[in-house]
Amino acid sequence: MRYYTGVKDLGNLDEAVKEALEVKKNRFGYKHLGENKTLLMVFFNSSLRTRLSTQKAGMNLGMNTMVLDVNQGAWKLETERGVVMDGDKSEHLLEAIPVMASYCDVIGVRSFARFESKEFDYQETIINQFIKYSGKPVFSMESATCHPLQAFADLITIEEYKKTDRPKVVLTWAPHPKALPQAVPNSFADFMNEANVDFVITHPKGYELDEQFVRGAKVEYDQDKALAGADFVYAKNWSAFQDPNYGKILSTDMSWTITTEKMALTNNAFFMHCLPVRRNMIVSDDVIESPQSIVIPEAANREISAQTVLKRILESL
Ligand code: AN0
Ligand code: CP
């Protein structure tokens, strides 16, 4: 595997999950793969989990790891070609990418949707420039439209906690005060559509996601109906995708918050969220602190999804 930007790069998902569970049992068994190899992680946006879990995954594999926070201490980067650079941007991404690539063997990139242009975001302009101009394997640490390391960790977690062969998994929108990207729900839907689960998406009208990720999955606009009989509740906020509201907040309806009453509608479901989460907006204190909340093991599995992806990349070098 040379690039990891979406579910398609993993090939057979059952095999990928099996491999991940093997990695989890033997995380220091592949140290030879990363010897004298350098991982560079480039962040255009904040991170806690992705930063630490991916760095840990690289270290488990024997790699040296370097982190660059583009907005803290590096030169401000221009990303559009043809711009007269007479403003506050000192360097162009078209020089910065090959320079960064010259110091490493594998590059991870985090660059969120900017909500300035749906085209710019959905064409994945930034991560595609890294793929095109670095000459090195590149993986997504959350791009404008996808967060495949998160969704892979989510699938591994569901595999570990499921009590039936085909659990009901509900992705529910929940309120949030800031406009957030669609990357997490896009990738979660993409993975669930290929997994052996009964998958339902619920959100208020106007929050329809891109059909390339929804792929005909069931959308139920009544959250209570969607939650009935759920084995897993995956909460997440996202901003509107559809025009003319791309990147906008259409609702902060607190009746969508996941509370004990909402969880009572489910089949004693496990509660999941990618984190960071705003308590008592997305989920009540009681639910996230309950024994059914698996957000911490879910986050811990980010080390495993990253290590499985890095292992496959290293095996292809
Ligand atoms: C980001 C998002 O919603 O895409 C990162 C989640 C992993 N969340 C926030 O910015 C709060
Ligand atoms: N879930 C996730 O990607 O978290 P961070 O934004 O903290 O990396």
Image (spheres, grey):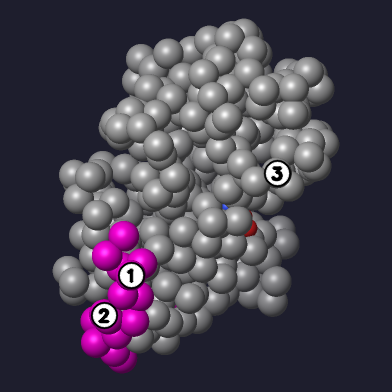
Residue 104, placed above or below residue 139: below
Disc with the residue nearer the chain's start (3 vs 2): 2
Disc 2: residue Cβ within 8 A of ligand 2's nearest atom? no
Contact flag, marks 1 and 3 (Cβ < 8 Å): no
Q: Give amino acid for label 2.
A: Tyr
In the image: residue 228, left or right of residue 98: right
Question: Can you give x and y, in whole percent of width and height, for residue 7 in the image?
Answer: 31, 43
Q: Quadrant of the C terminus?
A: bottom left
Q: Taking 285 as reference, is 33 above or below it? A: below
Residue on which the image places disc 2: 30
| Image quadrant where residue 243 sits | top right
Q: Nearer the viewer, residue 118 or 211?
A: 211
Percent position of residue 205, x then y: 63, 9
Q: Position of residue 132 (x, y in %)?
A: 31, 57
> What whole-number distance in Å separates the C-alpha atoms at marks 2 and 1?
12 Å
- Considering only vertical position in the picture, is 78 above or below 72? above
Spatial separation of the CA atoms under disc 3 and disc 2 = 36 Å
Q: Residues within 10 Å of mark 3 (few under 14, many from 20)?
A: few
What residue range appears in magenta? 21-40
In the image, residue 56 lies in the stretch drawn in magenta: no
Q: Amino acid at mark 1?
A: Lys
Relative placement, left or right, of 36 versus 11 is: right
Q: Earlier in the sequence, mark 1 or mark 3?
A: 1
Quadrant holding the N terminus: bottom left
- Say which residue label 3 marks: 290
Residue 18 is at least partly visible in this image: yes
Residue 106 coordinates in the image, percent (x, y): 34, 72
Q: Residue at x 63, y 18 (%)?
A: 265
The label on residue 277 is none
Badge nearest the viewer, 3 or 2: 3
